[in-house]
């Protein structure tokens, strides 16, 4: 059985936590929280309405996350619990384009596409300012770092920078210098200098004391981000020789550059040896151009985002790439495990780039060399090398340094007259490879004995032999485990077996009704497997070329197959997005994995046969783990136990044995069922119900009490269930000391969430009780004048009882809530 544990993520807007452990980035209607150390998504905050997030901001204290969507709603999140704590209308008539917090984490500024800016008091929860005067979309808002000045800086489509005095709600100054959109603002540490960047290829240095321009720095590229270097650090390696203000720019050329503000001189330009050189005419449209730049002061690093949604973390002062995260991979065409311990995977996407991921950290190295889409990959298991082929009619061989993980190209070959669609590497120590092309030929290449070192030009591959193999495109080639024979599969619906010594044809496999996409040798038997566009997988004997078995189950083309479990099972991936596991002996599909939404082009197993990686046209990569029989038995036992508990819970609820059902419902982590149990007649509504509830709750384990407290925080937000939440809280707050409560996991967060809603319930019930005083007064008056009205025609006591009877439960609720408010205050 296989379990998956790997997903992809995309980046558009970027924020980094104050402790620099997490990256916050948008992906459609979600904000993904990425852990920098291992590259894993630890939280995913998703909009309920599935509307795309237009802007978001993280408070400087890392406690509050606020998102804005196209639904014109602002939502405040407790991102650690992935819970929305508050939502409100943004008042803007159109979506919010930008937002930022002040340094105290109490004020939030939002800039709208309607040209207005609104300020919100996050603590008191109301709009404090409505600033009008900007032209068009307000795409940039920033607070002055000195909060005592109460100044807000903004920029809109008129290319000007406005300074707003929050005391008077007026614009006190307009800074005009740019002729294109202002993309970034950076304040000096003393707050007296501002540097603005724009797409008009200039940066402007402003004197904020005199509110005028000090200097214009021509940077000769559209700048998207600017970061001021600290004067307390040694940046001499970046050309910083004086104490003058220096800043880093990131823009359309895709490189970081350091500028001296006093002389407008570039003192350092970053070099990217692995990236292709773009012509000057194409710099503005370069996919490697940088669209965002953000400082990480604690670790002295920089974070940048490229136009391809890749995040790069640079270590200062050398500006060396420390980590790289790929946000979007396009169609996954092929993937392979890499390294002696399968520590990396190499991915071919619908581009000319190759991406090498380190599995432990998800950090990525991007390889350049091909000039067109890479179509296929294969690895030399014994040599820590792999080969790639592409539509540019070329092959390349790459070597990975086992210590550093750095990959470089060591050889390349040309000779095919059309796109090279498949490649296979030798399985034993002697290094050679075979390629199949859309020119209908197969070539066998010898790898040179001496391969170049890092920085040297790649060696040239030598063609040993070329053979016209098929009548149509060669879709797949595979070298046998003993390096003696080669199999090929073609669009002409046949597979062929060749001798690698002289490329003589040994036999032809006929039987598929459509083209063959993949061929694979069994690692243990003299058997060949073929996958075809007719939706079937066939096993063929190598002695007589007969079909031994046929596996049918996919609804569309089978694109990839591999042998797993030491050759006893097959895994297939198809155009239907399904991955199927087959047992060869029984011809049975034992498991179907529905993890992809599009064609599964890529499929590969690890050297230890315990992991499998799949890649699809839906841009997702999934890594699957083969769990042992013991783990499978344990998992099945847990599932059976869950089923038995659910059945027992259902029986207890039917028999109205609510007290026993409570413990089972908590162990199953079903908050709705727990609430249903507490609402049961035997627990809350009977006279002895409170005592029975108290006795039951006190018998719970600490982890169960933690769950109940977590449920109460949710129930208390709803007026329909607040009475039950308060009844449970009364028991917990009465019998547990504050020290015991704070030992609960997340107790502080839950209690802080309970306080505002509890106070709101008190106010609501107080107003209701005050209104009930009128009924008491009316009843007293009606008793005095009661003789004047016929008791048969008008029964005031009956009407009054109908009005007052709902207050009985309200009074009980008031008693619970007021006691709990006192506990909270203490």
Image: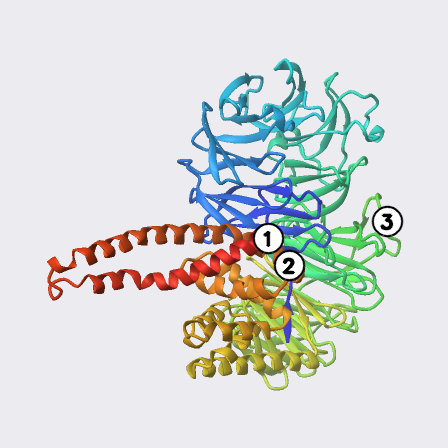
Residue closest to the eye, 782 or 124: 782
Q: Which mark is residue 748?
A: none
Mark toward the viewer: 1 or 2: 1
Q: Does residue 739 sit above or below 185 in this rendering?
A: below
Quarter of the figure with the N terminus? bottom right
Mark toward the viewer: 3 or 2: 2
User: Which is more N-terminal, label 2 or label 1?
Assistant: 2
**Mark 1 near mark 2, Cβ–Cβ under 8 Å?**
yes
Please, what secondary structure does the residue beneath circle 3 have? loop
Please, what secondary structure does the residue beneath circle 1 have? loop
Please, what secondary structure does the residue beneath circle 2 have? helix
Whether residue 434 is visible to the viewer of this picture, yes or no, is: no
Give the tally of numbered discs. Answer: 3
Indicate the position of residue 426 as horizontal and vertical percent values. Answer: 78, 65
Query: Colour mode?
Result: rainbow
Whether residue 90 is visible to the viewer of this picture, yes or no, is: yes
Residue at the location (62% across, 58% down)?
746
- Direction from residue 487 to residue 481 in the image, left or right: right
Residue most toward the right? Answer: 450
Residue marked by disc 3: 452
Indicate the position of residue 469 as horizontal and vertical percent values. Answer: 65, 65
- How far apart are the alpha carbons under marks 3 and 2? 68 Å
Residue marked by disc 1: 826
Residue marked by disc 2: 738
User: Which is more N-terminal, label 3 or label 1?
Assistant: 3
Q: Does residue 771 sit above or below 811 in this rendering?
A: above
Q: Quadrant of residue 313?
A: top right
- How far apart are the alpha carbons under marks 1 and 2? 9 Å
Residue at the location (55% across, 31% down)?
140
User: Which is more N-terminal, label 2 or label 3?
Assistant: 3
Q: Residues within 10 Å of mark 2 (few under 14, many from 20)?
A: few
């Amino acid at each position: 059985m296989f379990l998956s544990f790997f997903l992809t993520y995309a980046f558009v807007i970027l924020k980094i936590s104050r402790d620099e452990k997490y990256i916050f980035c948008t992906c459609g209607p979600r904000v993904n929280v990425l852990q920098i150390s291992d590259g894993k998504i630890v939280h995913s905050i998703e909009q309920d309405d599935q509307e795309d997030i237009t802007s978001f901001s993280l408070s400087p204290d890392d406690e509050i996350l606020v998102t804005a969507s196209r639904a014109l709603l602002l939502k405040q999140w407790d991102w650690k619990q992935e819970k929305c704590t508050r939502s409100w209308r943004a008042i803007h008539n159109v979506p919010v384009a930008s937002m930022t917090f002040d340094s105290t984490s109490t004020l939030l500024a939002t800039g709208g596409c309607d040209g207005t800016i609104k300020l919100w008091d996050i603590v008191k929860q109301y709009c404090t300012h409505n600033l009008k005067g900007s032209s068009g979309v307000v795409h940039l808002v920033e607070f002055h770092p000195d909060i005592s000045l109460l100044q807000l800086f903004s920029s809109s489509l008129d290319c000007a920078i406005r300074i707003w005095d929050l005391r008077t709600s007026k614009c006190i100054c307009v800074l005009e210098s740019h002729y294109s959109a202002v993309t970034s603002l950076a304040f000096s540490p003393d707050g007296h200098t501002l540097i603005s960047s724009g797409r008009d290829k200039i940066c402007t240095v402003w004197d904020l004391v005199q509110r005028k321009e000090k200097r214009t720095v021509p940077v000769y590229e559209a700048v998207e981000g600017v970061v001021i270097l600290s004067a307390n650090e040694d940046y001499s390696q970046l050309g910083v020789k004086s104490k003058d203000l220096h800043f880093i720019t990131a823009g359309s050329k895709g490189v970081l550059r350091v500028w001296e503000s006093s002389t407008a001189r570039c003192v350092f330009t970053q070099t990217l040896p692995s990236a292709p050189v773009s012509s000057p005419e194409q710099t503005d449209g370069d996919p490697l151009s940088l669209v965002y730049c953000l400082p990480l002061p604690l670790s002295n690093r920089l974070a940048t985002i490229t136009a391809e949604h890749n995040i790069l973390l640079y270590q200062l002062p050398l500006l060396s790439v420390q980590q790289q995260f790929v946000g979007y991979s396009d169609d996954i065409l092929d993937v392979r495990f890499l390294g002696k311990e399968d520590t990396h995977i190499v991915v071919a996407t619908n581009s000319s780039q190759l991406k090498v991921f380190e599995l432990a950290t998800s950090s990525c190295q991007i390889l350049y060399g091909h000039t067109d889409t890479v179509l296929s990959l294969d690895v030399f298991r014994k040599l820590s090398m792999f080969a790639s082929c592409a539509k540019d009619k070329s092959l390349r061989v790459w070597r990975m340094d086992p210590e550093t993980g750095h990959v470089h190209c060591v050889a390349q070959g040309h000779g095919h007259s059309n796109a090279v669609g498949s490649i296979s590497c030798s399985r034993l120590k002697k290094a050679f490879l075979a390629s199949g092309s859309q020119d209908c030929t197969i070539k066998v290449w010898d790898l040179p004995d001496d391969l170049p070192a890092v920085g040297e030009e790649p060696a040239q591959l030598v063609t040993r032999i070329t053979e016209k193999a098929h009548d149509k495109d060669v879709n797949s080639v595979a070298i046998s485990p003993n390096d003696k024979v080669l199999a090929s599969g073609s669009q002409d619906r046949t597979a062929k077996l060749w001798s690698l010594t002289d490329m003589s044809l040994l036999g032809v496999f006929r039987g598929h009704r459509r083209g063959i996409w993949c061929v694979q040798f069994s690692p243990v038997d003299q058997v060949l497997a073929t996958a075809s566009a007719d939706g079937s997988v066939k096993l063929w004997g190598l002695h007589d070329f007969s079909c031994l078995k046929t596996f049918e189950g996919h609804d569309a083309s089978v694109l990839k197959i591999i042998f797993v479990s030491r050759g006893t099972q097959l895994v297939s991936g198809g155009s239907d997005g399904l991955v199927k596991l087959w047992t060869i002996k029984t011809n049975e599909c034992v498991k179907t994995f529905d993890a992809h939404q599009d064609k599964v082009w890529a499929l590969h197993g690890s050297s230890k046969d315990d992991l499998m990686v799949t890649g699809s046209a839906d841009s997702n990569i999934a890594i699957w783990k083969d769990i042992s029989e013991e783990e499978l038995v344990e998992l099945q036992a847990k599932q059976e136990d869950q089923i038995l508990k659910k059945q027992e819970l259902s029986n207890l609820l039917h028999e109205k044995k609510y007290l026993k059902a409570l413990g089972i419902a908590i162990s199953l982590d079903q908050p709705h069922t727990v609430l249903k149990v507490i609402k049961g007649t035997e627990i809350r509504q009977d006279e002895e119900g409170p005592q029975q509830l108290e006795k039951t709750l006190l018998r719970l384990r600490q982890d169960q009490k933690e769950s109940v407290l977590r449920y109460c925080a949710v129930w208390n937000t709803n007026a329909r269930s607040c009475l039950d939440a308060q009844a449970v809280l009364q028991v917990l707050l009465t019998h547990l000391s504050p020290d015991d409560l704070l030992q609960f996991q997340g107790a502080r967060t839950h209690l802080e969430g309970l306080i505002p809603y509890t106070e709101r319930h008190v106010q609501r019930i107080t107003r209701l009780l005050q209104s009930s005083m009128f009924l008491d007064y009316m009843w007293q008056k009606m008793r005095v004048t009661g003789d004047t009205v016929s008791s048969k025609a008008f029964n005031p006591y009956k009407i009054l009882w109908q009005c007052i009877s709902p207050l009985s439960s309200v009074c009980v609720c008031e008693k619970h809530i007021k006691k709990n408010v006192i506990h909270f205050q203490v």
